[in-house]
Amino acid sequence: MTNQIRTITNTALALALAIILEVPANAQAPVLPLSLNNSRIPMLKSALLESKKSTLAEQLKILQTGKFEQQSQAAKAILSIIPKLSTRATVVSLLAVGRFYAGQSSNGKQLKNSDQSYRQYLVKASKKTTRYSEAERDAVFRFILATYRKAEPNNSWTTSPLSQRAFRDLPAYQAFVERQALEHWHKDRRTKSIITYRRIAKKLTGKKQRSSIDRRYAYLSEKNYQKDGNITRHEKRLRILLSNYKDNQVFGAKNESLVISNKKRVLYYYERLAKKEIAAAEKKSSSSKHRLEVIPLVKRLISNLNDDKVKIRHYKEKLAKIYQVNEQHSRAVATYQSLIPGASLIKKSLYLKYAIKSQSILASWPQMVVWSSHKRIKKSQRALLRDLHNQRANLTSSEIKWRHSAHSGLISINLGDGKTAFSQWNNQLSENNITRTANEIAGFMAHTYKAQKSWGELEKISRLAKQKRFKFIFNKTGTSPKDMLALSLIEGGNQHLKTGQYSTAREKLLEFTSKFSRHKRYEEGLYHLALAQRGEGLHADSIKSLITILRDRPSSKYASRSALKCSEWSETIALEEELIYCGQTYLKLSKNRGIKNKVRESLARIYIGRELHGQASYQLKMLARDTKLQRSKRIKFALKALEIEERYGSSVAAFEAAKLAESISKGNHDVKARALVVKARYFFETNRASKLERVISQVEKLNTDSKAVRESLAESRFYSAQLMAATKRPEIYSIELKNPSLVLEREFNHYKKIRDKYLSICEIGPNSYCGPAQISVTSIADDTLDRIEDISIADKLSKSLVDQFNSRKMKISDIIASDHQNFGEKALETVNNHHTSPNWTLQILWENSTDWNFDRITGETSNGFIQFDPQLVTVEK
Amino acid sequence: MIPVLQILYPILLVVSFSACTTTGSKSASLSSAKSQEPILGQVGSSKFVLSSLDRKHWVQLRKSTTNQSEKLYATLAAGAWEAAEAEARNYLLKNPRNEQALTVLVIATSMQKKHPLAAYYAGLIETYHRPSSESLNARALATVTAPKADINDFQNAVQLFHQAFYETNTEIAAGLNLGRLYLELGDAQGASEIFAETRQRCKDCLPSLVGHGIANSRLRKLSKAKTIFHLVLKINPHHPQALYRLALIAKEDKQIKQAKRYLDLVMIHAKSSNYIIAKKAEELVRTLDSQSDISNIASDSSSEKKQGNSSQQDDLLIDVGIRE
């Protein structure tokens, strides 16, 4: 539709221009006037005056006025006298005879058909005229032509009966030639016609008439071009004309305006030619060959347009367009670029658009924005294309601007200058309105940052996107800036964490965890926040973060490691409650036996420190029960549990712990002995002598070279002795005794039995119960002496019997008293061998030497010494 | 009290400003300004056995100093155990595994009789760093104060105290503890050796003298023991232990009267301050009374005549002590 309107408009304009420029309405009409109206014979008067023969005059008169027969005779008469006539008279005679034979009257009317012989007379006449004046020759020339045209009006001008040599210099001759040219034209000898016109024009150089001939020449050339389509020939003709017009005197003096006018006319034809060919060349259906013809044509036209900038721009545009259509993109781009300076904004934008189109082909770069990667080829072409995109981006706005920006940036990236591209995009995103392509740019940037792990940049663009409310579109899929911000914060935080930039890492991760608590990586964020906080020295905060994971996301995959870290770190900063909480949580969450055991150990230590003995014992027992642990370790844990249960737990629990230790020991006499003594203690406390004896017999089977075994055996025997000593014995009432000797012996035996039991402790070897046993013997001795003192015999019995009894009693008393003294001293000696525990030492010392350890450091009420050395720093005054 | 400690423990804090001016280096100046000044205390007591500076000084330092490490020790030296513990914990929050803070924590908890906790943190010191006198001493104290400790525990404690004592040549507390443990285990010889070494380290501080005296008594080196106890009485004329021990020595020497005079002094001066020793002195007096008969008294009186000069010397020492 638009093209149609354009065509109609162009046609109308051409028509109007043709009217203004006075294009001949009838193109067949000659341009040069050739008047053939004078029927009088030229040079007649002078010829007659010159000729002295009256005959000629008479005959001529007859020929003009006589009847036909007379005329015929007169003609013959004239012909007969011609050789005698002067040249001039001859010419006149031949002209007259010729007209007669041509069938014409003296006034030039065609009276009858011509006799073809007339031609010879006219030709002869013409040949005789060469020496005459221009006026005479012109008259002859016109007379011959007039005669001929009347005699043979339909015949060709070219067969005119005359010798052209005689008239070539005549102005009328050119008119005659033009008529021949026109005749050629009409007889479709167009080239000949045009050539003839050209000759005419040449002949008329310096004359005003040439102006018209030139115009005709141009006109016919165009007509011929319109028919044969020979662009080159037509253009060449026009060019020649234009070349001629460089001489402003080409139409003679004072006709410069005509030169200008003609030049305009020729340019008009030139432009018509160009426009037509351009229109054709612009079509895709046009051939490359044709375009290659048109291109120089347009170029030459442009060179002839002098200072007509508007037209030059117009034809350059067309030229560029043809280049583009003809796939001469490099030239197209160059042409468009040359058009840019001085063009309006709209035009500039348009030129750039087309230039970009061509340059994209040269650079093998897609017209549409393609976000996938491109091969790195044609760098210089792409650099130029980027410049063009940039230029057009600066001239446009909104979506178009964004597209060019997108191309520019992508090319920069392709050229290895992604930094600049992204920087420019960033600036543009912050300054301009956002369209779909802008969203794609942002999306591309965001995903590139993501792929490159440039988390700081991703964070910036995500914040910008949130602020300006644009989206990230990548691969036709939208991504929320919020999601990207979250990603950038967590990944950025992680990155900073890896490089030891803890403060920055903390900032990022803190923001992530505070803003994105529902994010799927929330726990990871918290975990890494804890790491960052620790790195920064915010240890308490770090622990809080870890506990938040355990409290809020106990099923997270980070929960277990958080618990572990929390317990490990809490230990280093003396956060006991946190250590316990995290350690216990780790035990619940983890299946890693090895680490769990370490945590259990850690927990056991803090439980002992915090005097949470039940918990400590539990963890130690758990460790002891782990059959995958080394036996030595298991034994150690079992014994520690045993120790705790004994000191702080119930005897039942201690007994159970002992069984556990014993079950693990498997042949380890020390452990077995430690376990058995607990049992012994238990049976002693529950007053079960037989079971205690059984334990003793078990311990006795162990290797007493071991200190632990000796201690166990000693302690067990000590308990056994104590049980025996504590056995309630009947009161002794001497008066009731039927056999005092027997009672005396029984008491003595009982004493010996207990004494020996105690003393058997010292036989084991060095142990801490020997001293206590010895001092216990003194105590038993004391009691026995008291009891023996109460045994007496009746004086009324036989003296020998009484003496025997008293003697025996004395002896027994001496033995026991001696034991008392000896074992008291021995106990003191034993104590001095420092194998006895402090409580017994205290007692033995006191009983033997009234020496008392007032300043005890053992026992729960002790007051040991503590020392510290303040590290003082005195600041310089 | 005689300001013996002030004589024995001149302030070690020397600030070498001259060094600073010659070197022009601040770090050099600070380094030379560091000084060690041991403070010796007993568990459960806020009064120190040894300390050259009074509490006021430490309180003032605690308020004025900006150096966290210094502040920690100032709090400790001011005897504010709970505050020291809290500050050590706070310091650890910012400085995990910090040896100084852990040490302060160990000491503060030990002084509050939280021996298991002190042992726990002592264990951490040894795990994170290396065993120190403080950590070993604390662990040993935790061992000997544990309920139902057996001979094995005490022997372990002996090793720990021993290691602590010889960890540095300025350690006193572990020496005193070890000496006393030796005495409690009946190893008078061991105790004597350790107390002798401790006396050198603490320049005859009271606990070392008393311990050394007891050890010598048990080794039957009565004369040496007596001399040592008189040294104690020079420092503290009413020292109950010294008086009691002198009474025992007098008893050994059959100087019952003299013994009873010592015991009377014990009962007078320790009645309110040390109930146990007063009670034991009373028991001993009763024992002496029950053992004494006319003949003993006669022999005792003749013996006393022979020992008149030394007895007078004792009296003189006591008098001197009292007057001082």
Image (spheres, coloured by chain):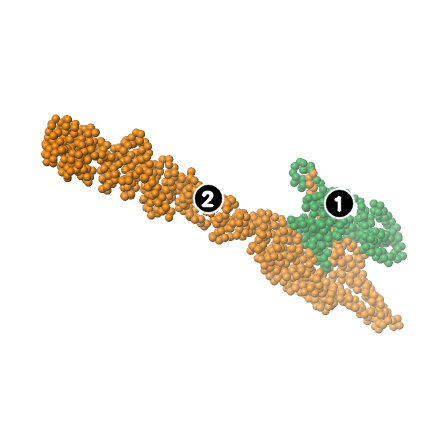
- Nearer-the-camera pick, B175 or A808: B175
Same chain under badges 1 and 2? The reply is no
Dot in front, 1 or 2: 2
**Numbered disc 2: what chain?**
A
Graded by Cα atoms within 10 Å as few (under 14), some (14 to 19) or many (20 or more), the crowding at tag 1 reads few
Residue at point 35%, 36% (across, down): A305
| Dot 1 amino acid type | Lys
- Residue B206 x %, y %: 78, 48
Q: Relative to B175, is A69 above or below?
A: above
Instruction: Say which quarter of the image contains residue A735.
Output: bottom right
- Residue A217 x %, y %: 27, 37
Residue at point 15%, 31% (across, down): A92
Q: Relative to A27, is A131 above or below?
A: above
Residue at point 75%, 63% (across, down): A759
Q: CA distance from mark 1 to mark 2?
A: 82 Å
- Residue A396, numbered label: 2
- Nearer-the-camera pick, A267 or B309: A267
| Dot 2 amino acid type | Thr
Chain the render paints orange: A
- Nearer-the-camera pick, A437 or A147: A147
Query: What is the quadrant of the C terminus of chain A in the image?
Result: top right
**Numbered disc 1: what chain?**
B
Q: Is residue A60 left or right of residue A488?
A: left
Residue at point 66%, 39% (across, down): B26
Instruction: Say which quarter of the image contains residue A117.
Output: top left
Please report contact status of discs 1 and 2: CB closer than 8 Å, yes or no.
no
- Residue A356 x %, y %: 42, 44
Chain B tint as drawn = green
Q: Which residue is mark 1?
A: B56
